[in-house]
Image: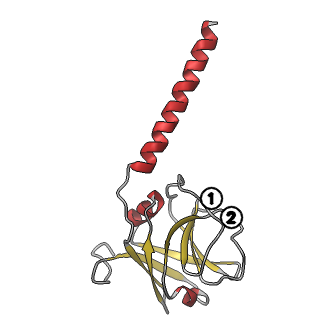
Amino acid sequence: MIMIYSLAACQATEQQNTAASDSLEQSGYTSVEGTQIKMTTENTEVIITLNDSKAAADLAAMLPLELTLIERNGFAKGMTLPKPLSAVEDTTREYEIGDFGYWNAGPDLAIFYDDIYEQTIVEVIPLGHAKAGAETMANETGNVRLALVDEEGDQTANG
């Protein structure tokens, strides 16, 4: 009997600890909502406004980054990150041209430049949106640079 109670108590404590760490994971960050990043290739530049998510905050903390573009089925450009972002966010398969998201299994970023599909194949964590210019990514290859943008629209000293 004592073993059963001990086991049950351990499981309850483990569940409480998991819930507490999930809560800390979600609330223990500074929001970057409204922060802009500049995505630059050899031929184009796209400004993306980040949302209020821990994953977006994690990405902002990693910048600047130089990554290799990967074509994703004729509707998005992907980029593999050097390390994963937070994955405690809600996911979606819905997207619009200009959406910027994260697929934690990669760990990959994606910017959607065409809406030829009803939805994505994999669940994506939304990170932000580009109001204009995402379509210009369609023919881009090679490397892409991601850097924070300051209030005047220039790359920050970190970039």
Amino acid type shown at disc 2: Val
Image location (x, y in percent) of residue 106: 61, 62
Q: Quadrant of the N terminus?
A: top right
Residue where numbered disc 1 is placed: 105
Closest to the observer: 156 or 125? 125
* Mark 2 closeness class: few <14, some 14–19, many ≥20 residues within 10 Å: few
Image location (x, y in percent) of residue 159: 34, 76
Closest to the observer: 109 or 68? 109
Amino acid type shown at disc 1: Ala
Relative to residue 105, is residue 51 drawn left or right? left
Q: CA distance from mark 1 to mark 2?
A: 9 Å
Applied colour scheme: secondary structure
Relative to residue 121, is residue 51 drawn left or right? left
Please say if 59 is above or below 3: below
Residue lying at 44% horizontally and 67% vertically, measured from the top left: 51
Image location (x, y in percent) of residue 15: 55, 31
Residue where numbered disc 2 is placed: 122
**Quarter holding residue 53:** bottom left
Residue lying at 69% horizontally and 70% vertically, measured from the top left: 120
**Quarter holding residue 91:** bottom right
* Pointer 1 or 2: first along the chain: 1
Relative to residue 156, is residue 34 drawn left or right? right
CB under 8 Å between discs 1 and 2? yes
Image location (x, y in percent) of residue 76: 63, 79
Callout 2: SS:
loop
**Quarter holding residue 107:** bottom right
Residue lying at 50% horizontally and 58% vertically, measured from the top left: 85
For residue 53, the mark is none
Residue lying at 62% horizontally and 58% vertically, measured from the top left: 105
